[in-house]
Amino acid sequence: MFITRKHLSRRAVLRGLGASVALPFLEAMVPAGVRAQAAVTTPRLGFFYFPHGAILLANDDRWSPAAAGKDFELSPILQPFAPFKSKVNIVSGLRNKPAESPDPHGITPGTWLRCVAPGAPDGGTTADQIAAAHIGQSTTFPSIEVAAEGKPGPAGVAGSGFGDTISFRTPTQPLPMEYNPRKLFYKLFGKGDNDEERKQIIAETGSILDFTLDRAASLRRELGARDRTTLASYLDSVREVERRVQKMKEQDLSALDLPEPPLGEQADFRGQQRMMFDLIALAFQGNLTRVANYMMAAEGSMKAYTHLGISEAFHPLSHHGEDPTKLEQLQRLQTYHCEIFAEFMQKLDAMEEADGTVLDNSLLLFGSNMSNSDMHDNAPLPAVVAGGGSGRCKTGQHLRYAADTPHANLLLTMLVRAGVPVESFGDSSGDFAEI
């Protein structure tokens, strides 16, 4: 227990001309005499999607650990999670039957968090939006939807958006994924009634933090030593992201009438992927949102991961035909996706707050809605669940379920652990007591 002299609102912000910066969790936000762990009770939920499945062949499984339970060794692709082995669950054996279709890339993203086929008479709101309606209303943004790649995937069923989003607010209302980091930064930190106003204000005033320095200095004088350190670290992180956003602005080619880009990595795709992770981390730390969705690459992506020494574009490479050379390259690519997600976990785990870290107080799904990309299979799906869910989840396990166990069971479990009052979801048959 700790006592604070001043009680600061959990929704307090630093305000300046044309800008407002949300604050991370500070001890001063806990009323005197109240235990710290009471301050963070509802876990944040995150859904991180990568396309084109994983190497999960019947005769060559490079994703799944060999042993189940707590005494397991990480597979080659999952090695980046070694520092967080005690804070993740690897979940095997899941199937998303409603995602099976003759048009796999056209509906695969949009059915991952839905577990209901397009056009089904009942259901269809995605798990993230069900959560946002219950745990996101106390934050500035009930949910945020972002992507690393702007070029849309296949249009999906009748142009319904199933191919280029993972989030549906209603069964028929897909939510667009924001792929421009500058726009997302303005949205999260800029003042104004809409995105265009925020963009204009920041363009006129310059740095967001420069216009909150007076208030930040005043607040520091009111805080204890630990809070001052937390605040300084958080503002430094915002400043660094802002610097990168401004640099990106200098390279903005959006006003030009450009032809279709050639195959290959464009405008530092690796930096784009990491930037979106950094913005989500700041949004979580500042309590701007409690629900985040991220498409780490587009369905049918034609990006070539040249920084990994891979010249062939992602989608063609995913149709490997069990060619050893292609499988080796695909393993490198999938391991890289695990690496940048592990970097994101590291950032969250370094953000201290009541009774743990932001990672401890989050529940994050990292996975795909496809298994063997060469065959467009939807079972067994690759899935990693990270974070302690504010103490509500068991971790450090490889959970191997019977073949064809509904993927919806995992999503139902996440909703239940987040305190969302649901008894079923999609084609679920029950939640997982093991998590």
Image (spheres, helix red, strand yellow):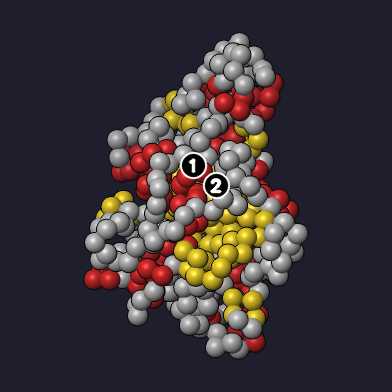
Q: Which residue is located at x 46 percent, y 39 percent? A: 419
Disc on the earlier residue, 2 or 1? 2
| Circle 2 residue | 363
Q: What is the three-letter code of the residue carrying label 1? A: Ala
Foreground pick, 379 / 197: 379
Mark-to-mark CA distance, 2 and 1: 8 Å
Q: What is the three-letter code of the residue carrying label 2? A: Leu
Is residue 400 in view? yes
Foreground pick, 45 / 143: 45
The picture places residue 59, in percent across and down from the top left corner, at: 64, 83
Q: Which residue is located at x 63 percent, y 55 percent? A: 89
Tell me if residue 227 comes above or below residue 261 in the rendering.
above
Q: Which residue is located at x 65 percent, y 35 percent? A: 356
| Circle 1 residue | 418
Q: Which residue is located at x 56 percent, y 62 percent? A: 383
Q: Position of 147 compared to 195: left or right? A: right
